[in-house]
Image (spheres, coloured by chain):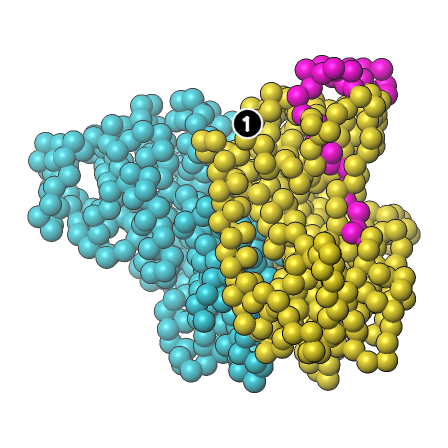
Chain colours: A yellow, B cyan
Amino acid sequence: MIGHDPDRTYRAVVIGAGSGGLTAAIGLASMGHHVVLVEAGDIGGDCTNVGCIPSKTLLHAARTSIADPLAHTRKRRDELAHEEDELIRNHELIHLVRGWGSLTAPSEGPHVVRVTDGATIHAIRAEHVVLSGGSQPVTIDIDGLDAARTLTNEQLFELTDVPDSLLVVGGGAIAIEMATAFAAIGSRVDIVELNDRLLATEDPLITDEIESALATHGVRLHLGTTVARVVGDVAHLADGSMVDGVDRVLMALGRRPRLDGLGLDQAGVEHTASGIVADGWGRTSVDGIWAIGDVTGNTASTHGAGAVGRRTVRAIAFPKLPKLGSMGAVPAAVYGSPEVASVGRSLDEVSRIDERSRLRLVVRYSDIDRGFTDSIERGVLVLDVERFTGTIIRAAITGPGAADMIGMFTMAIDHGVGLRSLFDMVHPYPSHAEVLRQAADDFARITYPSLPREWLAMARGRVRRVRRIRRR
Amino acid sequence: MIGHDPDRTYRAVVIGAGSGGLTAAIGLASMGHHVVLVEAGDIGGDCTNVGCIPSKTLLHAARTSIADPLAHTRKRRDELAHEEDELIRNHELIHLVRGWGSLTAPSEGPHVVRVTDGATIHAIRAEHVVLSGGSQPVTIDIDGLDAARTLTNEQLFELTDVPDSLLVVGGGAIAIEMATAFAAIGSRVDIVELNDRLLATEDPLITDEIESALATHGVRLHLGTTVARVVGDVAHLADGSMVDGVDRVLMALGRRPRLDGLGLDQAGVEHTASGIVADGWGRTSVDGIWAIGDVTGNTASTHGAGAVGRRTVRAIAFPKLPKLGSMGAVPAAVYGSPEVASVGRSLDEVSRIDERSRLRLVVRYSDIDRGFTDSIERGVLVLDVERFTGTIIRAAITGPGAADMIGMFTMAIDHGVGLRSLFDMVHPYPSHAEVLRQAADDFARITYPSLPREWLAMARGRVRRVRRIRRR
């Protein structure tokens, strides 16, 4: 319902109605608690309005050649946004207050959140405050580039015409997904990325495939450089090259947490430039103040915000329940063509593990039979495991089914299932999932040198069998 | 290499060079054993020549509108068949003998296999015999139907022109896959199936989706009937209806093991009409005689034959190694559009479990957010679990990614991971894999009534959240 009771002390105030905030507010309300939800913008936050939902809808529309993909995307997005809006406005236990929420100095009693909406200021009391204000796109000033041609994800889905050309600045998930989508619906797409490769958080074996796939789809890559200035419709890059005929420029340079105006310092909540310091339960440095999602910098995905948000709800609603174990592995996915997904330790963390105690396994889709029947040229599984146990440290996949197959690796990490026992796992033939089987075979071959060298060359896959034995 | 030494006692004779036989022969040879491989037909057996490889290649060609899909399919198939043929012919430890292999009466010493090739008869001695002769298509006589128009999978991929119309008799995996492929490349396809639904080994919730998908692709279904007779190009069905303009008829009525001429009775090998009796290691009733793959009726897939074949190799090559545990779960998959995959107990086995100790969870793709962004109308996860523990008894999925996602369920079954702990598993948003997350949520909601009823309604998925709360 709209509005709140100023005399009441609520169970919680949730600041921000995006992925994390909705999980917290609906979760607590579902348990019978009255919750105030503070939001100045659209219910659903970035995910519903300018993130996951429109981007994946557009990617689908592009893949399946739906007529007027941009209008289709907006229509679907608006349907869901409307439903979410109705849900919150009509919820008996969720009290929606429009405006900007801010913490105040700590008091002995309940927390007080000040909500400012133009000239109106409310003070709302609650036992708990959940900070879930999300993040905003990082932008840079480019000499000569006018605002009218500049987009972030916040304006992108409002385009009514497919731009003739789109210059994407940045090389992360949003850049890859939107370059894929706009190239498929008819824009000429250029990506300019300062790093010497796309998706720098992933292994070069993965990003190589992504770069080559984008190139095949007509996307031009300008790596290791940046846009120095724009003159008319010509972008001059720092490396001296030029991109002409630039219609629109999409800033896809990453996200930064929305910390301004939250009153973190007044309330004594520890934070850095990368976000509010919080643990896997959402606990901040101040008792009763929680932070989840992009505002923390811990997770930068709807599923990450949701996973922590559920734990926050559990901790607030059932403070006496025994604590759950540490949070399971949180996968990441990029829904380009092909998809990319990864789970486990970061590349940096892997590189800090002594090389003698880890092992890297690389299986290409072209080495499995589904790769043969489907003529899959690009696709690879990169697996870092403990050398002797086969325990999975990190898995990264690009190729068909990556975002669905990563589940096997997430489960294996969560439950300590290593390659040694996965050697006996049976996968449907011929499925993409056979990349895991091949990795388990390779692990066994490398790890058990006491077995005759070729014991494991008896491949289960026809293609791999032929290739393996030929290489002898 | 071609030929054998009549005076030698080989480590093994393998009868049949299909999926199971190649796994056994190459596996044993890889360990340094001399093996005789007996095959009258093509190396690679059904899978390479007239099964998985051409069918999946054709499905891919149909999906991606490759020009002349039948020629493309044959070309790819022939490339692989040629490679396998070369591999076997040039293998130093595999002795290829052309002809039909047959067991002889038991002797005190090594087993003797008689190989007949026209007038030539060889007797080959070996310590072990592996029976892997595969299966052959079941056919029926239809009054008025001439052989020239009748196909099984053995002739299907030799077609050089796409038939104007294809009448498929039968409703299993081959029927569904080939109906999907031929409808996509331009044939008018009719399926006539005696059961009142397709794929009778799967749950009606699954087969409903498949039937509706086929109908959308233009395939006409004639269920609960059979072809009584063919007059000219008109098929008269037993229910009185007619299919006219019948060009080709594909018999897809299942497979039966190739037992004739194997000499099973002479050698005393136990068998039934459904196949040679063998365990998960391939052991038959006679010491030193093994049977794997379709010839046993235990598994009817390349991955099933391969999984048992690897164990047979291990048992023959390392008889003193400790026995492995029982074989893991063996999934099944049908690569239609959408895919179907299942794993765990059969429907019959599930139905024999007391209803009070099991629970069925059904999640539709339309209930998860990827279903929303991708407008997925058809797709469902059907999960049978133990009521209190959440241990997975059987999982069946139809929808995008089914054959890859089934891996999570195979792993869960193999490692005893139940829905209770899967409640905490994090899946990429928005992936198809979220059907598992939703099932885990539903399980918790049903199973923990002590928790406030709506604790679990705090959905992680936007779409599901809206729908769930609306239904209250």
Q: Is residue B167 magenta?
A: no
Q: Residue at x 72, y 16 (%)?
A: A233
Three-letter residue code for mark 1: Asp
Between A332 and B180, the residue placed more toward the observer is: A332
Q: Callout 1: residue from which chain?
A: A
Query: Residue B213: x, y in percent?
Result: 35, 46
**A92 lies left or right of B227:** right
Between A260 and B407, the residue placed more toward the observer is: A260
Q: For the C terminus of chain B, give its image quadrant.
A: bottom left
Q: Residue at x 79, y 62 (%)?
A: A102
Q: Residue at x 60, y 24 (%)?
A: A163
User: In this orientation, does residue A44 appear?
Assistant: yes
Query: Residue A136: x, y in percent?
Result: 75, 46
Q: Is residue B177 above or below residue A271?
A: above
Dividing the picture into quadrants, the one containing residue B471 is bottom left
Q: For the N terminus of chain B, give its image quadrant.
A: top right
Q: What secondary structure is marked by label 1?
A: loop
Dividing the picture into quadrants, the one containing residue A36 is bottom right
Q: Residue at x 11, y 51 (%)?
A: B239
User: In this orientation, does residue B429 appear?
Assistant: no
Magenta-tinted stretch? A230-259
Between A45 and B50, the residue placed more toward the observer is: A45
Q: Is residue A238 magenta?
A: yes
Q: Is residue B285 above or below residue B35?
A: below
**B264 lies left or right of B426:** left
Query: Residue B198: x, y in percent?
Result: 30, 53
Question: Which residue is identified by label 1?
Answer: A161
